């Protein structure tokens, strides 16, 4: 989902600063909700750290390939949401992306505002969807395949829509940009075939080793109904 350098340039890039400010505002709101809940400062800090390290590894270790106007990554946004909660995941996405740019891909830093917006806004969307889709009395370890698929499809679809927006905003609506965005969209949505299965596998492990996944490093909703 990294926007390729040169797609949005000049004065147009100013919009990415404004969108990033909005994305950081959403992240702060999600983090505050964690503090107000059962997470507390320790829970927020520890989960954010783990999420940051995982996101950094997702970007650098897992396979990623340039396709069209962007790159296809296995980010596992819905997996992180279920394991750590929306606030820590938002912080992890923002910091993991920043660390990746600082140490391995400095050419991506000018696109940081676009990329962080592309990651965090869909995360906020699936955090709202999860509250409506998953009954309050259902711990996340009991999420069904249908529910995991809905979360993954919504997250990945949100990323594709944002990438399309940045591409058309930067390059205009043309046959070439349409082809590049379409190619990226088809490739990226293929992640939806894999991510729900990963979600269920990770949740099954969390359920099996519940003694190790009930502490402050994990979302309290993993094993408990919503308050």
Image (cartoon, rainbow, N blue to C red):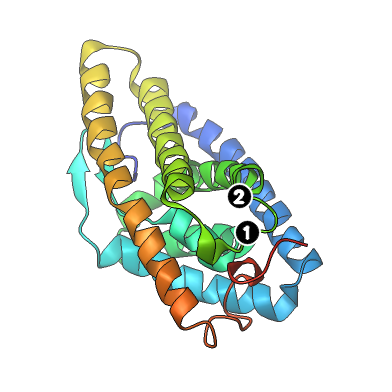
Q: Using the rendered view, name the quadrant where residue 218 is placed.
A: bottom right
Taking the view exactly as shown, the residue that stands out farthest to the bottom is 211
The residue under the point 69% across, 61% down is: 31
Depicted 185 relative to depicted 226: above or below: above
The residue under the point 69% across, 48% down is: 25
Disc number placed over residue 134 in the picture, else none = 2
Whether residue 179 sits left or right of residue 200 in the image: it is left
Q: Which residue is mark 1?
A: 138
Which one is nearer the viewer's eye here, 204 or 94?
A: 204
- Look at the numbered disc 2 and give the secondary structure of its residue: loop
Depicted 76 relative to depicted 113: above or below: below
Q: Quadrant of the N terminus?
A: top left
Q: Badge 2: few (under 14), some or many (20 or more) residues near its Cα, within 10 Å? A: some
Which one is nearer the viewer's eye here, 227 or 65?
A: 227
Whether residue 95 sits left or right of residue 65 in the image: it is right
- Look at the numbered disc 1 and give the secondary structure of its residue: loop
Residue 214, image x and y in percent?
A: 60, 81
**Image marks 2 and 1: residues in contact by CB distance under 8 Å:** yes
Whether residue 213 sits left or right of residue 109 in the image: it is right
């Amino acid at each position: 989902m990294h926007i390729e350098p040169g797609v949005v340039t000049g004065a147009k890039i100013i919009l990415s600063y404004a969108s990033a400010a909005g994305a950081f505002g959403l992240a702060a709101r999600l983090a505050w909700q964690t503090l107000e809940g059962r997470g507390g400062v320790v829970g927020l800090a520890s989960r954010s750290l783990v999420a940051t390290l995982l996101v950094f590894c997702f970007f650098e270790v897992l396979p990623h390939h340039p396709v069209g106007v962007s790159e296809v990554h296995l980010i596992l946004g819905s997996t992180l949401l279920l394991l750590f909660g929306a606030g820590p995941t938002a912080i992890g996405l923002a910091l993991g992306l920043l660390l990746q740019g600082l140490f391995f891909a400095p050419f991506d830093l000018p696109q940081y505002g676009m990329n962080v917006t592309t990651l965090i806004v869909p995360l906020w969307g699936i955090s709202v969807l999860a509250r409506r889709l998953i009954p309050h009395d259902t711990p996340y370890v009991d999420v069904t395949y249908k529910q995991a698929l809905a979360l993954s499809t919504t997250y990945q679809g949100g990323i594709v829509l944002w990438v399309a927006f940045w591409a058309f905003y930067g390059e205009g609506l043309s046959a070439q940009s349409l082809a590049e965005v379409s190619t990226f969209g088809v490739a990226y949505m293929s992640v939806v075939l894999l991510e729900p299965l990963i979600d269920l596998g990770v949740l099954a492990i969390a359920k099996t080793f519940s003694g190790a996944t009930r502490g402050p490093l994990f979302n309290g909703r993993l094993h408990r109904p919503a308050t």
